[in-house]
């Protein structure tokens, strides 16, 4: 089995590139059908979704726009909790069909926060499209309409996903190997 070392850990290939591509095409076809006659706005969540978004968008045959957004975390001056601000959104979403493009939904807290923030912009609709979903880790009730692959709870890298900033450039998806 093909292995790679990322920083100080070993990872073994778990989802080959060809399998990822087949699932991305399947989901893109579904979106093309479901959104026929509409001009959706794709909101790709950086950094992890950049490769998935690039592959997905090339399979979308609808007229569409894309914007890359980020949830920036910082400590508030007067608060004890962490503030997560949506940055990079340069489109008016009022009345628009929005599709969030995410690399992986783990606890679902990131997506839940994103939905809450985006709803304030009065979009026509919002759907979540994720490359990977860990159903075993979900902590919130989340409606994930489009999902390429469901995965176990293990930590993954590659195809945009990182371990401590590294490994995003691996073509396949790798899972943390037991030593
Ligand atoms: P959530 O808020 O717990 O759903 O976490 C979502 C974010 O955590 C993703 O956008 C990733 O950046 C990161 N993440 C969750 N699981 C993994 C993983 O297995 N590998 C790399 N990043 C992950």
Image (cartoon, helix red, strand yellow):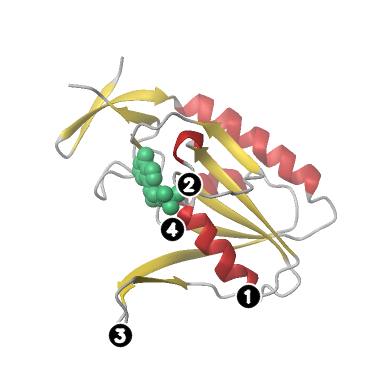
Q: Is residue 140 above or below residue 18?
A: below
Q: Disc 1 designates what residue? A: 120
Is the residue marked by circle 4 packed among few (<14), some (14-19), or many (20+) residues within 10 Å?
some
The answer as to whether callout 2 falls within 8 Å of ligand 1 is: yes
Residue 13: x and y in percent read: 35, 24
Q: Secondary structure at mark 2?
A: loop
Whether residue 161 is visible to the viewer of this picture, yes or no, is no
Spatial CA distance of label 3 from label 2 is: 28 Å
Which label is found at residue 46? 4
Whether residue 112 is visible to the viewer of this picture, yes or no, is yes
Q: Secondary structure at mark 1?
A: loop
Is the residue marked by circle 2 packed among few (<14), some (14-19), or many (20+) residues within 10 Å?
few
Q: Nearer the viewer, residue 38 or 9?
A: 9
Spatial CA distance of label 1 from label 2 is: 23 Å
Q: Disc 3 designates what residue? A: 78
Relative side of 168 to 99, left or right:
left
Spatial CA distance of label 1 from label 4 is: 21 Å
Q: Earlier in the sequence, mark 4 or mark 3?
A: 4
User: Residue extending furthest top?
Assistant: 1
Residue 74: x and y in percent read: 31, 72
- Residue at image position (80%, 43%) is 33
Q: Secondary structure at mark 3?
A: loop
Is the residue marked by circle 3 packed among few (<14), some (14-19), or many (20+) residues within 10 Å?
few
Q: Secondary structure at mark 4?
A: loop
């Amino acid at each position: 089995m093909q292995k790679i070392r990322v920083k100080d850990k070993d990872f073994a290939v778990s989802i080959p590139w060809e399998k990822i591509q087949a699932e991305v095409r399947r989901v893109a076809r579904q979106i093309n059908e479901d959104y026929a006659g509409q001009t959706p706005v794709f909101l790709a969540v950086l950094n992890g979704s950049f490769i998935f978004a690039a592959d997905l968008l090339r399979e979308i045959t609808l007229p569409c726009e894309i914007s890359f957004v980020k949830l920036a975390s910082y400590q508030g001056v007067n608060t004890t909790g962490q503030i997560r601000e949506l940055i990079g959104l340069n489109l008016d979403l009022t009345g628009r069909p929005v599709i969030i493009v995410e690399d992986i939904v783990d606890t679902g807290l990131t997506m839940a926060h994103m939905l809450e923030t985006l709803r304030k912009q009065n979009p026509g609709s919002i759907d979540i499209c994720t490359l990977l979903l860990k159903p075993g880790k979900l902590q919130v009730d989340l409606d994930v309409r489009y999902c390429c692959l469901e995965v176990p709870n293990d930590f993954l890298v590659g195809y945009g996903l990182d371990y401590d900033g590294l490994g995003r450039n691996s073509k396949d998806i790798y899972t943390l190997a037991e030593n």
